[in-house]
Amino acid sequence: MTTAAARRSAALSSRIAGFPFPFRADTYRYSTNVEPARVPVATEAGGWGGGILDIDGEYAAELAERERILAADPTRLTVLPHMRPACWDALRTLLRELAAQHPDMMELRRDGDELVWRNELLGIEQRFRDGDDDTLPGGPLGFLGSQIQDDIVLLDQREGSLWADAGLVTFAADWSLHFDVGMRFLEVHGPVPRVHEEGVISRAERFLMRLQPGQEYRRTNWTMSVDRRLDQSTEVYPLWGRDRRLIAEAPADELAERLQLRVEVQHLIRLGASGAVLFLIRTYLLSLAELAQVPAWRTRFGRVLAELPDDMAEYKGLTRFRRAAADWLLPDS
Amino acid sequence: MTLKLVVRRSTEIAEGIREIVMTRPDDGPLPAHPPGSHVVVDCGPQRNAYSLTNCGIDPGAYTVAVLRRPTADGGSGGSEQMHRFQPGDRVALSPPRSAFPPVSTARRHLLIAGGIGITPLLSHARNAVRWGADVRLLYVHRPGAGAYADELSELLGERAQRVTEKSEFSVLLRQALVSQPMGTHLYVCGPAALMDRVLQEAAAAGWPPQRLHLERFTPAELDPGQPFTASLGRSRRQVSVPAGTSLLEALENAGVEVPNMCRQGVCGECRVPVLAGRPLHRDEFLSEDERVAGDSVMCCVSRSETETLEVDL
């Protein structure tokens, strides 16, 4: 094997080993599938979930991608004015979290009335004044988004509801932060089928509203996409929508290489000082060909896709290719 | 979870009111909290809730102010114990709980405090000043018992009004209730009679209820509940569930595996079919109909009304 090929293979296997395979059964339905954060999960290929933030082999590439997307469309970062304290709270909380997980590479220290953030993975040292937006490039939320791979949404709690009032989202799966910002939690989830009749969303909202300072939970969500394209925001639908239609016609090998299981590990954290709910969305992509290297995943995902009710497949945008994907995953059935 | 802190300072700051400052034994950082949060402190046989007056951003210490309140029968209430704490004493308390936070979209915050009710509103005032929010304070107290008078006047200047005469308070309250900009939120903390009066007058002056906030203490946790026995229909075993132990924990301790996720009565994962007995539902998952049917129970939080609950396990 050449050095480059060896490196590719190592990267590939670490991607599989750390992949948060989300299915606990051969069928999938919506549920309020929250569980305490920071609990490691062992999978057939490795594991995930020991911490809140996961820096992996895609770190530099995904941060560069976010910077490019933000430069092209600054509305991906939207903060309503009353959310400034929450943005600073999120920044302090997560920089500290990074430093605790990577003490050899990262540090947040106080120097007089300034804070100093050092991140050797990116080769940066940044001085800023807590609460002073002008001292950080991009403001607190923009800067935070340049240090972690997760998309960020901040929910304010008032009038008996949660409101999605700030965020930095560059890797949305078929939604738009700019469209949703300022909406209530129930309104944001308006288009999701089934969940309202089943009370899933209002139950989730009640749960989130009862979280006390510092409590941390997580859940997973999933969909599928074509190629390793993280940005599937509504704003750029013309760039990715077409591939969803065409992929079903592709030869089997191409289908398996290009079609990805897209999993979001979402963290829900009640921030201490501001009382806002911090919603982190970390997106992982794994092609069907990669997934198939783990036989148990191949079979289970194939069965989930084959059984998924039509309305759920339609909402997730899988209608055109899910049969072809299930057939590839389950060749003997 | 319980925090084990050390009393660093106890100072009489006004007549009958002591300020108590607590830190970690190693002076390490404490959990951050929103303005208006409280902690539940173990004080002798009782557990009392006290508002935190410190800034909730990166707190190095928790500060409470306690009015000494002898109980009606002359016995010693929790506040007596709080007043007896000396520097160096250990104290156990809950992490901060938020039940009286500021509304972030308020155009103005109107804070109304009666006596020791100033404590949560002091942290509101500090937060408003830090973030440049529009804030006003009306503070009434007995002569000599004006805790934090100096801090407040330094913090708020002209924006604070402090009175000791009831008649003067009545005039200022009436003025305050009719002179705020639209979008003002009102926060009141003090004796029950004062809170009732402020809310009544505000309602009469046309304030919508969503703009009125008063300090309410919420129960810190689900109560430990009564002990009962889980009778396992399939394996014909009896598992006793003591007070303070959940049915799920008791089953796990007995080696019975039940799928579960949130352990908070929300996700629905740990639902167990009930064959006999009446469940005491404490979850958020089951619908009203399902509760009435009584044929399943979320074993992570719910218990039994009957001495024995027979489950299909």
Image (tube, rainbow, N blue to C red):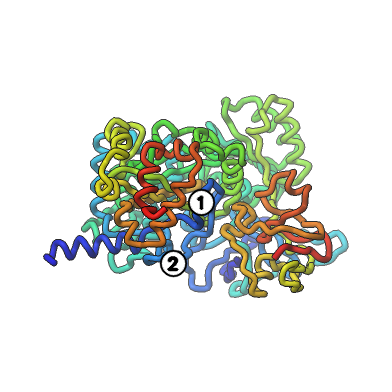
Q: Vertically, is A41 above or below B201?
A: below
Check disc 2 and report its element: helix, strand or loop.
strand
Give me the C-alpha separation between circle 1 and circle 2: 20 Å
Q: Amino acid at mark 1?
A: Thr
* Quadrant into which the N terminus of chain A falls: bottom left
Question: Residue B50 in the image: x percent, y percent?
Answer: 66, 57
x 45%, y 45%: residue:
A86
* First along the sequence among labels 1 and 2: 1
Residue B95 sits in which quadrant?
bottom right
Extreme residue toward the right, this view: B73
Callout 1: chain: A
Residue B209 sits in which quadrant?
top right
Label 2 crowd (10 A; few <14 / some 14-19 / many >=20):
some
Question: Residue B26 in the image: x percent, y percent?
Answer: 49, 73
Would residue A19 be visible to someone looking at this image? yes
Is residue A258 toward the left or the right of residue B84 in the image? left
**Whether marks 1 and 2 lie on the same chain:** yes
x 60%, y 34%: residue:
B185
Is residue A112 toward the left or the right of residue B116 in the image? left
Depth check: B272 or B69 in front?
A: B272
Depth check: B57 or A202 in front?
A: A202
For label 1, the residue is: A27
| Picture disc at residue A42 | 2
Check disc 1 and report its element: helix, strand or loop.
loop
Q: From the image, state whether disc 1 or disc 2 is nearer to you.
A: 1
Callout 2: chain: A
x 41%, y 57%: residue:
A299
Q: Vertically, is A235 above or below A111?
A: above
Q: Amino acid at mark 2?
A: Ala
x 59%, y 49%: residue:
A207
